[in-house]
Image (spheres, helix red, strand yellow):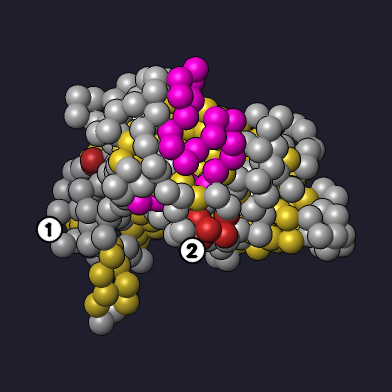
Amino acid sequence: MAYLGHSPTTGDNENFRLLDDISTHTLTFDGSSASIVSTTNNTITKSGHRFVQGQRVTYTHGGGGNIGGLTSGTVYYIIDDGKNTIKLASSASNAASLTALNISSVGSGTAHTLTVAFDGVNTKFTASFNSGTKASIKRAAQLSISINGVMQQPYDSATPTNGYGHDSDSTIVFSTAPASTDVFWGYVLASSIVSFNVSDNDVDTLNGDGSTTSFTLSKVPASAKDLIVTIDGVVQYPSDGSNTRAYSLAANVLTFVSAPANGTVIQARHIGFADPTVSGVTGFYGRTGNVSILDSDSIVAIQSAGTSIGTVRTLNFVGTGNSIILSGNTVDVSISGGGADTGFSTSTSGIHTTSNVGINTNDIPASITGVGNSFQGMYVSNGMIIYDNELNGNHYIGTNFNGLMAGPVVVNGSLTVDGHYVVV
């Protein structure tokens, strides 16, 4: 099927269509043909005619002879006798009561005409496109109509109090009859478009009182760009990030910069469409379109002991030593450790590590690691404190350093002493 702005595909007959100019329409017919002009039924036949019950029309004989019972240049009123035939009445009241004129004879000539037009009297016109194809109208919001460049307000009514409504058989009904000098333009969004949910194309009608600036809409538009707002038919411009204009939109609240005057009619036409079964994301942090994440977007909040560290998007574990560093929107976490086993366990004697422990100011050499379940000792620089009964590996107590051993101590390796040591 076709989307808005694209050509229809083969077999698609109703999509987005410009309407025929309804400000004037003339039917030209052969007034001398008995198959068209019926003296028996008092009818004029035109397949798929565009006339509406009660319309005022003007008849001419087109340079031929009058049809019996009619006078060229005279105004008559339409009686809709079916899809393909009409009758004529001498007055609007006779048309309403279906009292038709008697057609006594066919005329002469093949260019007889019936013309309907904007004349300050007619309020009903057939909505059509492609020179006569009737549009399928189920809701007034399918139509967008302007008179003299001013958008008209749609109402789902056959008797609208403002703007226009619609009636059966593709009929547009104006609240006020357009004058002969009025300029018409319009389009129809056909109901057969299956890729869009036409029910989203709703209209909220509100009333100004001279003091109210904020109005609640029936639903939340995707953005201010998905709304057409008019006051008494005049289109209003929305504010944006850099300009303050007529109104702004927050969720479903429409707020005007200045209160619309008392008695004015406000129309908010929702033009955002959604698929009838699947709806994608229409906004992110109040932004629409191809959205990128900003530094101000709260993605991950990091706290330590209830104190906020910051809002981040990336968490890295880097470096040596224990540290947590916040740099911009990245938190660097460093976790140090070593040995074959860094776990803890408990016993009747307290808490201990599941690995033998040695502590050195620089590193822990393999020579001080105990054997079996024994502790080899605690080595402090060039001094030594041993709480064990065995000393494994090669060790050195430097000058001016003291070693303390809780004995008896068995030296399995080499112990060199330039300082002092005590065995207790």
Name the residue at 50% across, 50% down. 89
- On the image, the x and y values in percent for residue 34 come to 27, 33
Name the residue at 46% across, 58% down. 99
Q: Is residue 349 left or right of residue 56?
A: left
Image quarter (top left, top right, bottom left or bottom right) of the N terminus: top left
Q: Which mark is residue 97?
A: 2
Camera-side residue of 340 and 28:
28
Question: Which SS class for mark 2?
Answer: loop
- On the image, the x and y values in percent for residue 228 come to 61, 43
Q: Residue furthest top?
A: 63
Question: Which SS class for mark 1?
Answer: loop
Residue 335 can be seen, yes or no? no
Image quarter (top left, top right, bottom left or bottom right) of the C terminus: bottom left
Q: Is residue 304 left or right of residue 349?
A: right
- On the image, the x and y values in percent for residue 154 come to 57, 51
Q: Residue furthest left?
A: 372
Name the residue at 32% across, 43% down. 39
Camera-side residue of 377 and 123:
123
What segment is highlighted magenta in the picture? 61-81
- Kindly identify the amino acid type of the residue bearing the numbered disc 1: Gly
Circle 2 residues within 10 Å: few <14, some 14–19, many ≥20? few
Camera-side residue of 370 and 248:
248
Is 80 part of what is drawn in magenta?
A: yes
Q: Which mark is residue 372?
A: 1
- Kindly identify the amino acid type of the residue bearing the numbered disc 2: Ser
